[in-house]
Image (cartoon, grey):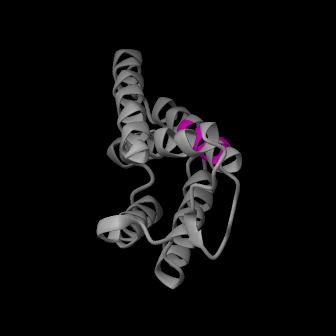
Amino acid sequence: MGTFLSSLAISLLLLLAAIAKWVSPSGLPNHLDQYAAIVETIVAILLLFFRRHKVVWWLVLQMFALWLGYSLYWYITNQPCNCFGDVLELSAGITVGIDLCVIGISLWNLMYLGMALKKIVFNLVLATFLSIAGYLVAMR
């Protein structure tokens, strides 16, 4: 039961975001909305069926770290990030909070599943670099 509720909640969040992007894309260049929706759907399905595998939680951690940087840019510039398409307009501050919560849940589940502390520290460093990359992508 340890990972079930968190995987279910995050899967529903990802599917909601994916559906919102398909129904009403925010107009990002190069069909970025559609690519993000595909990735969100795949990760949601992986979470539902393979929630006890560390690699799935690692993927969730890194994906939300990337999105944290993206959301953080829009929060700093005081603009909406449209992370849920144009259907559900959440402030960038709320999406930053969601990203941080999911990152925390992912770390908790990685520890629960027995990931070594060294690997968790390495993943946090990698997540930091991905957050910076997400921020830089949002700047362009």
47 magenta-colored? no
Name the residue at 35% across, 28% down.
129
Residue nearest the viewer, comparing 15 with 6: 15
Residue drawn at 63 percent across, 51 percent down: 79
Residue 118, compared with residue 59, is above or below; it is above
Indicate whether 68 appears above or below 29: above
Residue 97: x, y in percent?
A: 67, 42
Residue 80: image location, x then y, percent: 63, 55
In the foreground, 80 or 69: 80
Q: Which residues are magenta?
A: 97-103
The secondary structure making up most of the magenta span is helix
Q: Residue at x 48, y 76 (%)?
A: 25
74 shown above or below 90: above
Q: Is residue 21 left or right of residue 12?
A: left
The quarter holding residue 38 reads: bottom left
In the rendering, at what x and y percent does residue 71 appear?
Answer: 55, 45
In screen coordinates, is 78 left or right of 83?
right
Q: Is residue 35 visible?
A: no
Residue 40 in view: yes
**Furthest residue to the bottom?**
23
Question: Could you say where residue 135 lies in the image, as x and y percent from the top left?
Answer: 44, 38
Q: Is residue 127 above or below residue 15?
A: above
